[in-house]
Amino acid sequence: MKETKLWINGKWIETENSYTLTSPYNGEPIANVAKASVSDVEKAIEGAHEAFQSFKKTTAYERAEILYKVVEIMRGRKQEFAEILAKEAGKPIAAGLAEIDRTIATYQFSAEAAKQATGETVPMDAAPGTKDRIGFTKRVPLGVVSAITPFNFPFNLVAHKLGPAVAVGNTVVLKPATQTPLSSLVMAEIFKEAGLPDGVLQIVTGSGSELSDTLVTHPLVKKVTFTGSVPVGLKIKEKVGLRKITLELGSNAALIIEPSTPIDKIVARCVGGAFGFSGQVCISLQRVYVHESIYDQFAERFVEETKKLKVGDPLDPSTDVSAMIHPKEVERMKQWIEEAKGQGAQVATGAEFTERWMSPTVMTNVKPDMKIVCLETFAPVVSLVPYKTLDEAIDLVNASDLGLNAGIYTNVLTDALKAADEIEAGAIVINDIPTFRIDNMPYGGVKNSGYGREGIKYALQEMTDLKFITIKTTY
């Protein structure tokens, strides 16, 4: 069984304590994972701060070349990395390969962005008496970035932290999810091979509850970037003080389907958006609001398509849905569904459980205040709801404390623009599911869904300070 260590100051460091990492699919041990102490985290932050003093002086060209090298290395090891995802996250191999392709694109975007961190000139003569001055801005790196990442996209969401940080000259202390450390630790090898100086990337594995306070409050940390749950994100925001922060938190992504929509052309896409990686996706399709004139037709086709999905071994290329990340998550969803049924909801298909997985589940006759509707399920559960008017549908979408992505299918341009204006979400996707994301678009939510934006260009701005410089041209 694999034994892991911490990656601190360019060296593998042993720890006194460890924990056993097990497969979500079958519970078999995968690795003994090093468990960092607070002292280890402090050493990593101090080492990252020291490395920053020289790394901030590297050129954009040098940083871009490191990231391009990461891209090159990853392209040659895609199958290996997808198998890591299958083993530690229970992600079906096809979905794992898709994540690796996206991760490669994220690092490539980051390499390109390294050369685009531009400022602007400021017209100093716009104010009276300042004709003899020049003014301009530039983007400067912050220093040490604490990055705390979740289990569901352990390669690509790490890339969204590391890529922009390295591109602008920051250093990073990375704390991956307890369930998915192997995908992060392999990136230490890759960045080392790509030429990243020692200390620029530090990786500490272990308990988030034990390590997060140090990661977010240490005086040498200049920015915190966190992807995870709303309760944890709110606690981090309370502690972070005046440091910069980016939070990508929960969602219960909604989709409106207007009567002009060709049902047969979108059903498979909607099913994929609802049940990909067992619904354990921040923008997994959770709520579908269908116009009453086409509701029965859509519901019938949606259920038919859902029943075709294969639940099985994540290493089997034919598997569509595999285990959830932990048995306690299966038990949580079993309770939520039973509670909804007790309040009148009906199961159109699914709601079958074992210790480690649940079948793709379609719920009808739901109410807005049911947990499966108003909270983030992070599970293979979707609710279908009829509506009468577009205004009603928009109100239903907005009746939530969350607002990351939302979508609408319609052939009426004015209705699409109305939804885009009135839906409260970080992104509105027209004529596609809200699960759509590419890695250079701005990504982040409103309300309790987050704070700040990811997407390489936008993350770059959040990972730098804007410095203004003025020159008086005469004495």
Image (cartoon, rainbow, N blue to C red):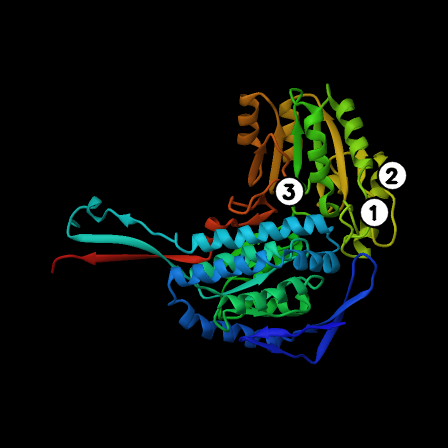
Residue under the point 83% across and 62% down: 27
Residue at (40, 67) in percent of width and height: 56
Query: Looking at the image, which is closer to me, 199 or 111?
Result: 111
What residue would you read off at disc 2?
342
407 above or below 155? above
Q: Is residue 7 left or right of residue 322?
A: left
SS label for mark 2: helix
Q: Which dot, 3 or 1, sits closer to the camera? A: 1
Q: Which residue is mark 3?
A: 401
Q: Are marks 3 and 2 in contact (CB under 8 Å)?
A: no
Instruction: Using residue 418 as the reference point, say whether residue 126 is left or right of it.
Output: left
**Quadrant position of residue 368:** top right
Alpha carbon distance from label 3 to label 1:
26 Å
Callout 3, which amino acid?
A: Asp
How many numbered circles does the render carry? 3
Which of the 4 quarters of the picture holds residue 59? bottom left
Dot in front, 2 or 1 = 1
Are there few (<14), some (14-19), or many (20+) residues within 10 Å of tag 1?
many
Tell me residue 413's x, y (percent): 54, 22
Residue 69 image position (x, y, % from top left): 50, 61
Classed neighbour count for the residue bearing mark 3: other residues with Cα under 10 Å, few (<14), some (14–19), many (≥20) = some
Pick whichever of labels 3 and 2 is earlier in the sequence.
Answer: 2
Q: Indicate which disc, 3 or 1, sits on the residue closer to the N terminus.
A: 1
Amino acid type, label 1: Met
Q: Which residue is mark 1?
A: 358
Q: CA distance from mark 2 to mark 1?
A: 19 Å
